[in-house]
Image (cartoon, rainbow, N blue to C red):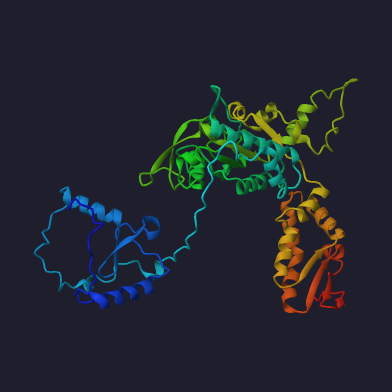
Amino acid sequence: MSERYDDMDFKEVDENGNNITGDASKELTDDKKNDEDGYEQYCYLCKRPESMVGRLIHLPNDIYICQDCMQKTFDGISGGNMQFIDISNLDMSNFDFSRFGNMNMPKSQRVKKKAKKEKKVEEELNLQNIPAPHKIKAMLDDYVIGQEYAKKVISVAVYNHYKRVITNTMDDIEIDKSNMLMIGPTGCGKTHLVKTLARLLNVPLAITDATSLTEAGYIGDDVESVISKLLAAADNDVEKAERGIVFIDEIDKIAKKRNTNSRDVSGESVQQGLLKLLEGSEVEVPVGATSKNAMVPLATVNTRNILFICGGAFPELEKIVKNRLLKSSTMGFNSELKDKFDDEDDLLAQTTMEDLREFGMIPEFIGRLPIVYSLKHLDKDSMIKILKEPKNAILKQYQKLLALDEVDLEFDDSALEAIAEQALEKKTGARALRAIIEKFMLDIMYQIPRDENIGRVTINRDYIEGKGVPVLEMRGVEVPKLSS
């Protein structure tokens, strides 16, 4: 019984338990395939689907067993852990399997099979096919407007990360990784920049949020969950994950809390827990989960070659920078006006380590992020470019939607300026553009499908400001109004 069961022959039986051979067996098998086609089958013992455990063994009465459970059963019998039953003299031809009922998963709980995707053959990374910094920046330029300095910094960092992973050493000189801290106001494109980078580059990249992290032992995710998400992005390939990139968003939310008498489990404690990950060490992380428990396997990942990019809005940091710059603002000839920096748009560019410590970041954490750079506020011209220039621009998305109805959508320059002005008033960055467009496009998307004769819609400034209507062009006839 210690031999594997791969070559065993499980015969088909009918409802009465009689063996079915020949054409009858083939017809029964074909009927079952037709009934089960498109749905997942589950192991009767461990309840795992076939997409997870592979091919299942079909026993009589629609019982499916995975190979792992079957092997464990045979190993238990051969090892003396189960009472041995001699079935060589038993006659199973008249055994009534129907009394067990249908042991398979109920249809109400079954899941449709996923369509199989062809795996792309990944080209092996070497020094010849590493994308140069100017090529990485050129790819980012197609999707991210402005932020030239930030795109240049992140392009060089990723390029150096590739070379560091491949060579590891150069003339016995170990190359240290350069973790980055990205500072910028809300809606300036921090997360969008990294998401675009993840989509364009062939490197495992995990984007996680620091707001859910807590100290080990408390409700929330441990710091190791950051590496668990990277491991999942690398298809649980440890070697592939060890050369990946991790982006931790909302890093300012783990700043040290002020004026608190309780233990800071989601602030300073998280920063201290991230120190070993940023520096580089071997950590045990759960596979396929965010917390460790007895039912989840663990994998050891070395973070020495993982590049960490942290980003955050850091609200109120501008006030800290301004107070530092105005320390010399006293009486005398060298005094400065207190409102000197009130109209400064790029005040975050003057951020120093001292300002970050004042904000609540501990020195040990800041020291492990040697590259600190800021993203600029978006002005009116940048907003207009974001609307129309990127490959996935918001206006292009709506033009594509109406093109499916054979309708052309156009925006004149005055409309774009009105949208940008309203977005700047909301002070939420580029996120305000989507909210504004969704509002005034509602009536258009509702009314256009009602009339098949409409060929073109032109949005003007009056319609954006609620003072007029868009210009409609019927197929060959221009109509200056749209009924609401």
Measured as percent of width and height from the top left, residue 431 is found at 71, 52
Question: Residue sitting at 85 percent across and 34 percent down?
Answer: 339
In the rendered view, tell whether residue 203 sits above or below residue 91.
above
Displayed quadrant of residue 397: bottom right
Left or right: residue 112 versus residue 341 is left
Question: Residue sitting at 22 percent across and 74 percent down?
Answer: 21
Question: Residue sitting at 78 percent across and 35 percent down?
Answer: 347
Residue situated furthest left in the rendering: 89
Residue situated furthest right in the rendering: 333
In the rendered view, tell whether residue 449 sits above or below residue 305.
below
Give 162 or 364, whichever is nearer the viewer: 162
Measured as percent of width and height from the top left, residue 296 is found at 38, 46
Measured as percent of width and height from the top left, residue 16 is found at 20, 77
Asked whether the viewer can see residue 311, the reply is yes
Asked whether the viewer can see residue 261, the reply is no
Question: Residue sitting at 47 percent across and 39 percent down?
Answer: 239
Displayed quadrant of residue 103: bottom left
Q: What quarter of the picture does the C terminus occupy?
A: bottom right
Left or right: residue 409 versus residue 72 is right
Measured as percent of width and height from the top left, residue 475 is found at 81, 78
Q: How many marks?
A: 0
Give 380 or 303, whichever is nearer the viewer: 303
